Amino acid sequence: MLRYTVVQGGLGLLAVRRACVLSRFAHSAPKSEYRPIKKVMVANRGEIAIRVFRACTELGIRTVAVYSEQDTGQMHRQKADEAYLIGKGLPPVAAYLHIPDIIKVAKDNNVDAIHPGYGFLSERADFAQACTDAGVMFVGPSPETVRKMGDKVEARTLAINAGVPVVPGTDSPISSLQEAQAFAQTYGFPIIFKAAYGGGGRGMRVVREYEVSLFAVGYENAGTVEFLVDKHGKHYFIEVNSRLQVEHTVTEEITDVDLVHAQLHVCEGRSLPQLGLKQDKIRVNGCAIQCRVTTEDPARGFQPDTGRIEVFRSGEGMGIRLDSASAFQGAVISPHYDSLLVKVIASGKDLPTASSKMSRALAEFRVRGVKTNIPFLQNVLSNNQFLHSTVDTQFIDENQELFNLKPTQNRAQKLLHYLGHVMVNGPTTPIPVKAKPSSTDPVVPPVTMGEPPVGFRDVLLRDGPEGFAKAVRAHQGLLLMDTTFRDAHQSLLATRVRTHDLKKISPFVSHNFSNLYSLENWGGATFDVAMRFLSECPWKRLQELRALIPNVPFQMLLRGANAVGYTNYPDNAVFKFCEVAKENGMDIFRVFDSLNYLPNMLLGMEAAGAAGGVVEAAISYTGDVSDPMRQKYSLDYYVKLADELVKAGTHILCIKDMAGLLKPEASKLLVGALRDRFPDVPIHVHTHDTAGAGVAAMLACAEAGADVVDVAVDSMAGMTSQPSMGAIVACTKGTKLDTGIALDKVFDYSEYWEVARGLYAPFDCTATMKSGNADVYENEIPGGQYTNLHFQAHSMGLGNKFKEVKKAYAEANKLLGDLIKVTPSSKIVGDLAQFMVQNNLSRAEVEERADELSFPLSVVEFLQGYIGIPHGGFPEPFRSKVLKSLPRIDGRPGASLPPMDFKALEEGLRAAHGDEITPEDVMSAAMYPKVFQEFKEFTSNFGPVDCLSTRLFLDGPKIAEEFEVELERGKTLHIKALALGDLNKAGQREVFFELNGQLRSVLVKDTVAMKEMKFHPKAQKSIKGQVGAPMPGKVEKGQPLCVLSAMKMETVVNSPVAGIVKAVHVTADASLEGDDLILEIEE
């Protein structure tokens, strides 16, 4: 609906015209007796009641309000001198239509006059008559006039008799379809069906897909004559509204006539000349615009929204008038009445001036907790057609860009919701151990001013991947890759380190470690964990770190054909992912496959190379090349695999020792053999320090010819993480392997992370694991998985059986044929090991009963060939016994998948989440559809939680704690947590804050308490077959599914999918909230 009105210099060029008429009928009738009014009741509510009360107060008249049971908290009853309940036990609207109650209150309290406002009883002749019969003045026309003007057909006849041009229409109400068809054939389309006794457009239907909104302003006492105007400027009468109209404020602003004052004086018996209201003295000055700010959602067909106003801040200033209803913080918008919050009236010398004032005022508004039509109004005010006064009844239909609504950020209130949620329900991310984050934040070491020194990324940008590889090979001394930003915290802290803490130390890294080969900070598990558990965008992390560290190459972990996921993707998805990653600042792609399955690796290498990245093909290492008894993964196997990778064009050759199995002797053998075979190819070695021999092994690799080894800063090193950076730097200092890194800067770097690590105490592996263990040489559990299994064992009460879990892991590995073990193959082995422990099964028993056991899905899919073919093939007869007749995949699993339709995916995301979807969002959804959906829902509810400190993110604030949150540069929130309220009947607690000096509160559902309370289920947006209520309301019988009725609006709920109704969750006359589940449809 069009919710604005403009009057400029008279009637101007509007499609809908209205002329205000003030009349006393004293010019042709005997003069009435003057009867002063001392007390006025307003038989209405909200904004119009307050408007009349204000006029009465200015005139020294005492005021009386009436209110329904549902309106006890409304502002109009507080603005009156007296207020009385009416319609007890009646439905909300019926209360204000109950004439006997209203008349009784008036008589009991010596009311002189009743003002009807607009809507409700304002155009009811029987109400006007009831007032007259009770001896109470009716502020409006006589009952007979109200009757005549209320009958649209009779009013039309009066106009014709008076010689006023009218729009073609029927002379009397039609009673059949044939009559309507005959009229349409005569006059053409569009036509309007309007109820003969309708009000406010209710019941009006346009035979064509658009609406014409009609507005008016009052009569007798005061009234409005309404016209349509064609393109030639000809006026056509529509109707007369015998009451004060919503848009009366526009007339008041441009004429300086207080219409309510005039109504009251005329009702007292004064004539217009006595009031100084002569037509020749009324002047139109400038232009005025009225915007009705309503709790309606333009994006959903202006459906009313309900709820609690959490924040309300209005626009004010010169040229702005506000006529408000119950627009204040804490007000509850119910579904029972009109959705008006406040009328904003802007006035100026001309339309552009008034429009600019209105635009400025609307931009100042902050309304949180309910949707409003403000974004739509702002679009109207910036439309050239509107600004040039050339709008007509098709204005909205022809300007669909009006619905390109700019979403409000609402960041501060959403963050308060998040903090309140954590205070009530605890952390949103799963906590492995019962430990609190440290209350001490790390201090960033001093950083030199100016640009950071030149680093290897400058070489890469200048010379490209090939030139970069040559520079690495030609470098004198040992190069280091720092894993602190990824694999170190994945191994020690369950991948939970947040961008917030990485960003703080990034400038220090950029200025003091410019000679690093690379910084591993992305990919692998960090991609999905960022969204899944940290509620962060992984792409934003990459972008922000890139801006802070421009000189050091970034490195990511790419799972070959699985990209950063745990499943197979179409080839074009892997290529597109690498392309977008490169565009966002990624440099080096470490490509591996969990089985060393060459076809999967080659696809990943090709994708990374096509994107322009440095390709670092990684040989996943297992076994022991120094043990002549273990020959499945022999030295010859690794050299031959390296041959294929070098032949495929890898820029860097990597040895990925994910379990820390490389002993010093094996390091010399393997690296030495590769160096001899490929003298010009840089060699990069990755390991874990689970057994404690990591530093010795990496020094052995360096001596044997490795160019780069992986390390983590000291306080994030050791155990299941990488070897110590400080140890490697110190051990090579002054030798041919000197890293060139200042040891004192390593100490500063380590001190930061030592304190930062305390923030992640709930995830720290040291809570349950106090040291590494050399038994990794037997069980071969990868570093990150070793930590996770330890956590899982303790959480399941199997902490004392972790030794058994590790033994079962080794046995499961043998059952599966002795695999390369890294995500996802390592998970498959782990799942089988836990299955064996939980069911108390030995390896022999599993082999014997393989055809009858219900194995974990990951094991079954591995045996089917879902992740590729392992070296040496699948274990038989174990595979055949498990699979029986299940299908098997031959060759590369993703080769048969059809290309991903990114255009369709993007369109679907825009439909679900709006037009702010980025190419990065599309890739996140392509990799993890469900996780991305949940991430978007989280951010929609809770905003940018990545700007919170880690302790606040995990644990929330303490009562009376004061803190600051920087939303962006130059925008800082000052917040104080004040109190936590008691549980209410809806299962919520009110949490109180002080935000920038103002009191704010949020209602938070107590998830524990709600388990014991019964609530209507909510529709899940991700399930198409679940139909949710588009707005709060009551259910009525109707087609095609049901009809919701609220705020004078009926909404037909259509089926979003074709299928069979599985369950119905509502009954007729049931009251619903927005998104309540109505029914479920099975496709």
Image (cartoon, rainbow, N blue to C red):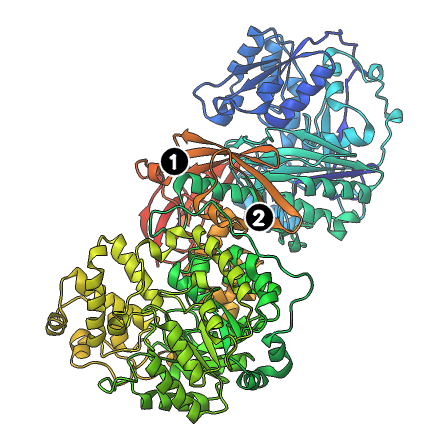
- 432 or 142: nearer the viewer: 432
- Frontmost of labels 2 and 1 is 1
In the image, taking residue 779 as reference, residue 284 lies left or right, namely right
Residue placed farthest to the front in the image? 734
Identify the residue under disc 1: 1070
User: What's the residue type where badge 1 is placed?
Assistant: Ala
Q: CA distance from mark 2 to mark 1?
A: 38 Å
- 367 or 196: nearer the viewer: 367
In the image, taking residue 803 as reference, residue 761 lies left or right, namely right
Identify the residue under disc 2: 181
Q: Quadrant of the C terminus?
A: bottom left
* Quarter of the view holding residue 11: top right
Circle 2: element type: helix
Q: At which x and y percent is residue 20?
A: 76, 29
Q: At which x and y percent is residue 1068?
A: 37, 37
User: What's the residue type where badge 2 is placed?
Assistant: Gln
Q: Name the residue located 79 percent from the left edge and 40 percent from the top edge.
A: 354
Visible residue check, residue 393: no
Circle 1: element type: loop
Q: Name the residue located 77 percent from the left edge and 23 percent from the top edge.
A: 258
Q: Is residue 937 above or below residue 135?
A: below
- Mark earlier in primary sequence (2, 1): 2
Q: At which x and y percent is residue 762?
A: 38, 51
Q: Residues within 10 Å of mark 1 (few under 14, many from 20)?
A: few
Visible residue check, residue 488: yes
